Amino acid sequence: MKNIDLHIHTTASDGTLSPSQVVAEARRAGLAVISITDHDTTAGLEEAIEASREAGIEFIPGVEISATHPIAEAHILGYWVDFKSQALAQFLSSPLSTRTARIAEMCKKLGELGMPVDPDEVFREAADAEAVGRPHVARVMLRKGYVKNMDEAFDRFLGEGKPAHVKRFKNTTADTIRMIHACGGISVIAHPGLIRDQALIDALIQEGVMGIEVYCHEHKKTQASRFSRLARGRGLLITGGSDYHGAMLDKPFRLGDLQVPYECYERLLEARRRLKTGS
Ligand SMILES: [Zn+2]
Ligand SMILES: [Zn+2]
């Protein structure tokens, strides 16, 4: 029986193996098809394509995008996205506008704490606006004498859980699904069992998501059959992957341990063909 794994991470995001090492592992495990789906980046794909070709493994270029929705957060997988697309690269690196908004939000919070900081001053500090972030805010705070050093700025105000901390803005699920489709990709809800509020799954289907990751290490048997029924009922694609991150203590499984029916890949291929011919 041919096995496949359509959800794998590498050192391009938070995995411990390089794309080539992942392909070598996949070969050892006898996988027929793999997809590398790093978090918010496509940086590992070129290397993986090359290595898969040499190893004789079918490869789907993928990505896993973190997205927000008023109900909860979700991870959306994109298969066969045009990973050389400029629009996608920009989308993944969080658009400048959201960074500007985040800095403004931090400055507002600092003002409320009695430490007024003008966002423009932070942008001047950053000079290269592309990379503006918390260190620039901290430097302005230091110059104004609000803190004695950068560490204090983070430890007391800007760090996670501190009063002037603002979460990195993410793309919405609707924008994410749209972007995957605009780049010729197929959108799939990753590990739906991990989504905090299951109402979000319905919302994502409304937003046009094309598939559900039914086979997943995180899913209990009952969850897998529930998601499988849901997918069939709604005419959605069924995929599966281990969410492999390399050797990790809290996830003691190896590539190839999870069984995913080869049929999932065949259905995906059909869907892709339909997308290409527009039928
Ligand atoms: Zn995920
Ligand atoms: Zn993942």
Image: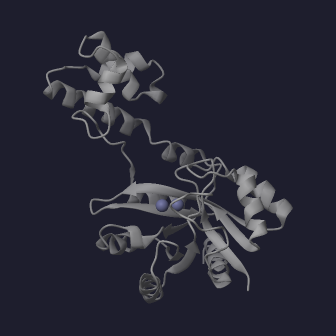
Of 149 and 261, nearer the camera is 149
In this figure, which colouring scheme has been used for the structure?
one colour
Of 80 and 147, nearer the camera is 147
User: At which x and y percent is residue 157?
Assistant: 26, 29
Number of residue marks: 0
Residue 240 located left or right of residue 45? left
Q: Is residue 147 above or below residue 29?
A: above
Quarter of the view holding residue 149 = top left
Quarter of the view holding residue 168 = top left
User: At which x and y percent is residue 224?
Assistant: 47, 83
User: At which x and y percent is residue 79?
Assistant: 60, 65
User: At which x and y percent is residue 179?
Assistant: 49, 56
Residue at x-position 38% and y-position 22% = 136
Q: Is residue 215 above or below residue 253?
A: below
Residue 214 visible? The answer is: yes
Residue at x-position 32% and y-position 16% = 140
Residue at x-position 56% and y-position 76% = 239
Residue at x-position 53% and y-position 53% = 39
Quarter of the view holding residue 121 = top left
Residue 215 located left or right of residue 266? left
Screen quadrant of the N terminus: bottom right
Q: Is residue 138 above or below residue 224?
A: above
Screen quadrant of the C terminus: bottom right
Residue 177 visible? The answer is: no
